Amino acid sequence: ARARALMLLAEPVSAEKAESWGLIWKAVDDAALLDEARALTAHLACQPTQGLALTKQALNASAGQNLDAQLDLERDLQREAGRTPDYREGVSAFMEKRPARFSGRRA
């Protein structure tokens, strides 16, 4: 119903309403935007960047594939992710109960 109304009526939607409807991930006040962006980029930079790239690859492919093709792709991407140094670091960090220190290297 919301999508239909948005398409037919073209009424403006506030950022807060878009967030509550799940149309956007997060609404941030203008004054906090730069700090929020810096915190997000710092967080992402500390993550397993190859894993993030593979996740994005799977998401980008998902709209144009059938289920079998998507599952095949995700299997292949999981295999690729499991061969990265970041995978080994993540498992080691988990087992040693310490924060992971990801490098972002492919091999």
Image: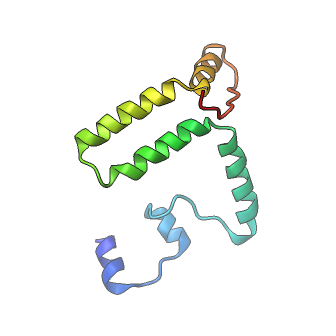
In this rendering, the answer to whether 94 lies above or below 68 is above
In this rendering, the answer to whether 81 lies above or below 4 is above
Residue extending farthest to the top is 96
Query: Residue 10, how many percent across, how many down?
Result: 39, 84
Residue at the image point whose x is 23% and y is 39% from the top: 68
Find residue 95 and report its image quarter: top right
Residue at the image point whose x is 72% and y is 51% from the top: 39
73 relative to 46 in the view: left or right: left
Query: Residue 92, how many percent across, how many down?
Result: 62, 16
Q: Quadrant of the C terminus?
A: top right
Pick whichever, 74 or 99, lies toward us: 74
Pick whichever, 83 or 46, lies toward us: 83
Pick whichever, 80 or 90, lies toward us: 80
Find residue 16 and report its image quarter: bottom right
Q: Quadrant of the N terminus?
A: bottom left
Query: Residue 46, how many percent across, how many down?
Result: 69, 38
Pick whichever, 54 or 27, lies toward us: 54
In this rendering, the answer to whether 87 lies above or below 30 is above
Q: How is the image coloured?
A: rainbow
- Give the mark count: 0
Query: Residue 79, how many percent across, how many down?
Result: 43, 26
Residue at the image point whose x is 30% and y is 83% from the top: 8
Residue at the image point whose x is 32% and y is 54% from the top: 63
53 relative to 66 in the view: left or right: right
Residue extending farthest to the front is 107
73 relative to 49 in the view: left or right: left
In this rendering, the answer to whether 67 lies above or below 91 is below
